Amino acid sequence: MSRDPAMLNAFDPQGAVDMPDAQRALILRRQRVLGPGYRLFYDHPLHIVRGEGVWLYDADGQRYLDAYNNVASIGHGHPRVVDAIARQAATLNTHTRYVHHGVVDYAEQLLATMPDALSQMVFTCTGSEANDLALRVARAYTGASGVIVTQLAYHGVTTAVAGVSPSLGTALAPDTRTVPAPDSYRHEPTTLGSWFAQQVCDAIADLQRHGIRPAALLLDTLFSSDGVYTDPAGFLAPAVAAIRQAGGLFIADEVQAGFARTGAHMWGFARHGLVPDIVTMGKPMGNGHPVAALAARPEVLERFGHEARYFNTFGGNPVSCAAAQATLDVIQQDGLQQNAAHMGAYLRQGLRELGQHHPLIGDVRGDGLFIGVELVRDRLQRLPAKEETHRLVNLLREQHVLLSATGLHGNVLKLRPPLVFSKEHADLLLDTTAQALQRL
Amino acid sequence: MSRDPAMLNAFDPQGAVDMPDAQRALILRRQRVLGPGYRLFYDHPLHIVRGEGVWLYDADGQRYLDAYNNVASIGHGHPRVVDAIARQAATLNTHTRYVHHGVVDYAEQLLATMPDALSQMVFTCTGSEANDLALRVARAYTGASGVIVTQLAYHGVTTAVAGVSPSLGTALAPDTRTVPAPDSYRHEPTTLGSWFAQQVCDAIADLQRHGIRPAALLLDTLFSSDGVYTDPAGFLAPAVAAIRQAGGLFIADEVQAGFARTGAHMWGFARHGLVPDIVTMGKPMGNGHPVAALAARPEVLERFGHEARYFNTFGGNPVSCAAAQATLDVIQQDGLQQNAAHMGAYLRQGLRELGQHHPLIGDVRGDGLFIGVELVRDRLQRLPAKEETHRLVNLLREQHVLLSATGLHGNVLKLRPPLVFSKEHADLLLDTTAQALQRL
């Protein structure tokens, strides 16, 4: 996403005077064979060679606290996932057109974490594929095509999903409409839900005015790329009622929010007391292994399932399911949802205390271990502190703490550390941030 | 694909009288949580629990010769791939926004197998994602939208790619046009190339008549779902010249043909003396691990790369690249391309000899270890033997040989065994097929 202040837009090897020769040579080879789409994080890119728990290690053996990677959710290189992958890959890895217990066992265990109405799954390999499939399913079920997303939503990179991902900056599809993000920092909490629902109603009306019936309201339930908006809990319910009233479905994109990250719940939609029609999931599902899925009400899947007979060659294969199974087991058996709740509250408290000394910190928000810290130049006017955020993210990287930023103005620090984050790690993050704020 | 005669369309557990209770129970649980999209192969589904080399083993320890799985291309559970995955997963698995040697080393080695003009890669997780991305790239480069595919093409399952995959039976996109497959069994070889090019020219004209400029001719270079058409070598060149003349690109879909399967060459397009603008690859790339990619001319990628800044969370991660690297190493070091050439020729020769006793065998074709055997009721009229093909595929499954069928009438046996297929395996396949043809 182009607004990410950690993103290096063009590496100039001549300018990187203090970079080791080997790293510079590798980056030049990389640019030659991977082309212009492949960006690197940070003004000084990192050459990471090893990961363990919350730590990443560079080629010089220096370690970095990973407070940003929501994919290696139960910790980098978790031995239970590594063992599960290695064992299953040595035993069998094939498609789902033979009977295998792995995909069935996992689907049952995963669906047990969801409301009863969501009782069937379809497996893909990426969150993009899951969201693309959700659009196909929603359109088959409703016979409609319109999709409503937030102003800076990110849902993935296939043609169809890029067309509903305004954060990419590429053209939206003709039947996409956007609504402003539910900016809890700039709206009165008591009216945020009704205001957001009104935006959705306006988008529905605009679709209808163009002869397009609405198929779905598609929302990242944490509004990650919009700037991380979680409060007040329940504010999404009126908007979801509005799309259903208009004949559309509610698709909860849990690719970022799901799998216990939000602490209080296993899934982001639960914070709002909702039962979605379709739930998509991905990133942390296999702790880095390419596995993703959707869950849905069976009546929503029925027509698409019979007509399209979706088959994904790698989706739901025994190795993917073994990785996902091990990840889910660790989340449940090690109490990582509870840890996310406790450590998230501890971090937010610490960040708010930092705010008492640093007026740059305008707002601290989020749920569990998905935290947004909005930096402002003026607390009264709430002017986005974009440049300061960029400098802070890169200062933290120099001090070996990895995070990034998000939001319309790139001025919201985005923290999403592995769920195994402990008090020791949180204190290191807070202390380092305090130092970086001093140096800023 | 709905025409696949190995596909079980609806499992009736009451009807499966000779099925073990445990398997019946597992299938019923499977139907409950996976829904109607998940089909099983064969009238009597298989419960596969282990794979090794060319063999698959069911829950009762019975072994089956896999002559169909083009994903586990260097053999099921190949230890070098398993070791590479296990080692890298324990070391580091993260995204491509940190520098890592794995993706660079692999891209360089892979691109060295291609024409020099194809010098950049973009990594995805599935062939569907690769083809979807290829359409985005082609449309960004040409500024056009029209896509021409064959009558029964299969290119994947995202919204955009399903829209250019008539074999799925779902709606095509408005800017898709189809051309008849280059049926080498029913056309004079000397005119096949010019005839096929004329079909492409007609499709271009039809697009233009609708105000749609052509962006790409997208072809599976083996025409796998159309019925497997490979001869005469070179016949594709005039059609590719036609699309370029009209301002469109040639996208070679090598998801099935690529990675040495065709024996004579590493890539299917090489048989036709072509240099594509974009090449997509997937299935066998990581021997079952979800890794896929496209390769392209850098000038084709340039604009899209800068504007869209494609990022795929799992694409090109260190574990995916380790799996792909090990697979490519084995193909190259064990001479699997040469083996595919020799064994493919041996199998086709054996199948043609079978045809001397069995008039059902109308045509034996293909390249390397991707073979089509067209079954007909009458060699003069070449009437498709659809029912016989269905029965033969299921008879072979009862005799523990796994393959399937393809083509417009589902009457073309499709053989695509692992590239490590030996003479012993080929003889078993030929003998079993001879017996099954007798029993038919």
Image: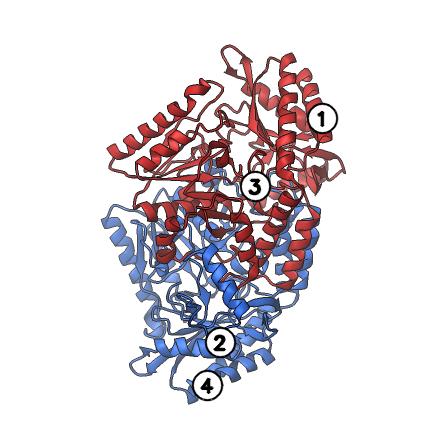
Chain colours: A blue, B red
Q: Which mark is residue B427?
A: 1
Q: Nearer the viewer, mark 3 or mark 4?
A: 3
Q: Nearer the viewer, mark 4 or mark 2?
A: 2
Residue visible at 38% across and 24% down in the picture: B194
Q: Which mark is residue B259?
A: 3
Cα distance between the residues tagged 4 and 2: 32 Å
Which residue position is annotated with label 4? A354
Q: Is residue A397 above or below residue A92?
A: below
- Please give the chain letter of the residue carrying mark 4: A
Residue visible at 58% across and 38% down in the picture: B260
Assign the N terminus of chain A to one quadrant of the image: bottom left
Can you give x and y, in whole percent of width and height, for residue A3 in the image?
Answer: 37, 67
Numbered marks: total: 4
Cα distance between the residues tagged 2 and 1: 63 Å
- Please give the chain letter of the residue carrying mark 1: B
Is the residue at mark 3 from the same chain as the one at mark 4? no
Q: Amino acid at mark 4?
A: Leu
**Secondary structure category for the residue under label 1:** helix
**Secondary structure category for the residue under label 4:** helix
